[in-house]
């Protein structure tokens, strides 16, 4: 007998912020292939474990790689679900991918205490990580 479980509970217990509180249940069988981002894999493993508790007749394979591979695997029919830990590009969305945000994680930026910077905007952090800003003096 299958029962309903809240994915929100699993997501939040794993330390993410759930975007929905939908409950799910299932009686179907078959195989699902999930491919993509290594940063999402630990959460997906917990969701798969919870899902298998209500539906032991399903086979779920997780292929850990990166976000782009997850997207391409879905587009090529290799995977049923792609794990993506970044914003999708317009070109990717235009290929007909259906996007469902599952959770949001956090990013902490830590600066050495000797650094005189005491406040960084999201735009400044993005510029640092994209290589647009390569010198602390450009942040002042």
Image (cartoon, rainbow, N blue to C red):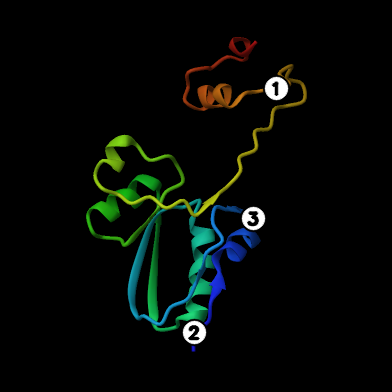
Between 94 and 130, the residue placed more toward the observer is 94
Foreground: disc 1 or disc 2: 2
Quickly name the residue at label 1: 119
Q: How far apart are marks 1 and 3 (CA)?
A: 25 Å
Quickly name the residue at label 3: 15
Crowding at mark 1 (Cα within 10 Å: few <14, some 14-19, many 20+): few
Point 74% across, 16% down: residue:
116
Asked if residue 41 is positioned above or below residue 113 in the image, the reply reads below
Does dot 2 land on a helix, a strand or a loop?
loop
The disc at residue 7 is: none
Name the N-terminal-most of marks 1 and 3: 3
**Residue 13 in the image, given as x and y percentages of width and height:** 65, 62
**Residue 121 in the image, given as x and y percentages of width and height:** 62, 23
Quickly name the residue at label 2: 2
Does dot 3 land on a helix, a strand or a loop?
loop
Between 84 and 2, the residue placed more toward the observer is 2
Q: Is residue 26 left or right of residue 136?
A: left
**Residue 62 in the image, given as x and y percentages of width and height:** 40, 64
Does dot 1 land on a helix, a strand or a loop?
loop
Q: In which quarter of the image is residue 8?
A: bottom right
Farthest residue, direction right: 113
Name the N-terminal-most of marks 1 and 2: 2
Q: Quadrant of residue 59?
A: bottom left
Crowding at mark 3 (Cα within 10 Å: few <14, some 14-19, many 20+): few
**Residue 92 in the image, given as x and y percentages of width and height:** 29, 41
Point 53% across, 17% down: residue:
134
Asked if residue 8 is positioned above or below residue 3 in the image, the reply reads above
């Amino acid at each position: 007998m299958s029962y309903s479980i809240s994915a929100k509970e699993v997501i939040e217990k794993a330390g993410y912020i759930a975007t929905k509180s939908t409950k799910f249940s299932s009686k179907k069988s078959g195989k699902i292939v999930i491919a993509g981002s290594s940063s999402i894999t630990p959460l997906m493993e917990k969701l798969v474990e919870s899902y298998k508790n209500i539906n032991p007749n399903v086979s779920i394979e997780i292929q850990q790689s990166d976000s782009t591979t997850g997207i391409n695997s879905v587009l090529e029919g290799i995977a049923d679900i792609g794990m993506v830990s970044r914003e999708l590009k317009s070109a990717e969305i235009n290929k007909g991918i259906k996007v469902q945000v599952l959770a949001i994680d956090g990013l902490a930026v830590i600066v050495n205490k000797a650094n005189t910077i005491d406040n960084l905007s999201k735009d400044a952090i993005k510029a640092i990580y994209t290589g647009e800003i390569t010198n602390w003096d450009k942040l002042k």
